[in-house]
Image (cartoon, grey):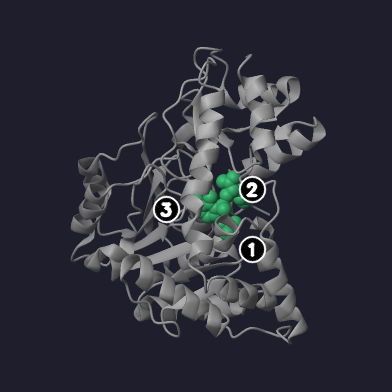
Amino acid sequence: HQSKLPNVGTTIFTVMSALAKEHNAINLSQGFPNYPSSQKLNDLVSNAMNNGYNQYAPMAGNLDLRLAISNKYQLLYKSTYHPEKDITVTAGATQAIYTIISAFVRHGDEVIIFKPAYDCYQPAIEVNGGKTIPIQLSAPNYKVDWEGVASKISSKTKMIVINTPHNPSGTIWTKHDMLQLQKLTKDTNIIVLSDEVYEHIIFDGEHHQSVCLFDDLKQRSFITASFGKTFHNTGWKIGYCCAPEYLMKEFRKVHQFNVFSVNHPAQKGIADYMQDAETYLGLNDFFQQKRDLFLNLISESRFKFQPSQGTYFQVLDYSEITDEHDVDFAKRLTKKFKIASIPLSVFNENGKDDKVLRFCFAKTNETLVKAADVLKLI
Ligand code: PMP
Ligand code: GLN
């Protein structure tokens, strides 16, 4: 058989986590916490199991959870998403992204993505017959040249995928960026897929620029989010997407035959947990302390950095240490120094190597101190 994805290998997250395990290294590569998810939330899920939430959830998701999500958008953005029509619960953001793309992208359609790009976008576009139009951004600021973006938009552009706060760079888009995107897509049929899985992890008093804050953008956009990121339980694989009804209708046509519905007790537990908005509003401070701890500890090292503005990732520039390719250096760092990270070149167009690695700081302070003790000496 001819492969549908001839250029796709195994995702870097699997590769680096396996290497970390093999070499008994501190795993700051794949993004997941190494501390427990909240006991209260665990208890609420277990209550849901003991109270009969053990059969199929409604296709679009448990209604209490969709109500909680809808309330969150009112509270944070004064934006209305109707719980029954505009919100669907998914098996993590990954499934939402795949399903959004497969519901809209036809053979030959062009989809613009910004690189470095999270690695699930491009294969989903291509397996559905679409053509990826990459726009490469550069370290260390990853700023968008909006005139450059305008030159890539054509009658073939079906979708633009955006992601703020941004994985892997830890940068955020400003209101100016969002207004530029709104201007460029106005009076077109372009759909925007806005990956906002890190919306609650943003630092230094900055505000998350959700597409739902911009009326015209909101009308053409899907937002996708992930409870794994918000509630420290990436293994539960619960997320959601929201969009205006005319888009969500098409999404559900695919979703119902893709997974039908997702884990019911976890949905009910999360719905009950979200009744207290502090459960997600406290995340900025929680992760900013971890970022600051990590950066203070390595401030005297030979790694250079701009502090992450959002996400739980910090990019470090190692060009003062070696001119090795970033994949080679990441592997050596894992095997010899017992710290695993993610090389950014794998997310870039043609493997562009800026000599930077991504480190996940969603770890206990003890782990961050241990890792910094090693990084300081390299
Ligand atoms: N988008 C981005 C930018 C991510 O970092 C991740 C990883 N959490 C996802 C999507 C996928 O999220 P999930 O684990 O909920 O599938
Ligand atoms: N989102 C996580 C990261 O960026 C990884 C998720 C995965 O392994 N697919 O590290």
Query: What is the quadrant of the C terminus in the image?
Result: top right
Q: Nearer the viewer, mark 3 or mark 1?
A: 1
The mark nearer the N terminus, 2 or 3, is 2
Residue on which disc 2 sits: 32
Residue in view at x 71 percent, y 40 percent: 17
* Whether label 2 touches label 3, CB < 8 Å: no
- Across and down, in percent, residue 322 comes to 56, 12
- Across and down, in percent, residue 309 comes to 41, 40
The mark nearer the N terminus, 2 or 1, is 2
Residue in view at x 32 percent, y 46 percent: 173
Query: What is the quadrant of the N terminus in the image?
Result: bottom right
Q: Is residue 147 left or right of residue 12?
A: left
Amino acid type at mark 3: Lys
The number of callouts visible is 3
Amino acid type at mark 1: Lys
Residue on which disc 1 sits: 237
- Say whether mark 1 is within 8 Å of ligand 1: yes
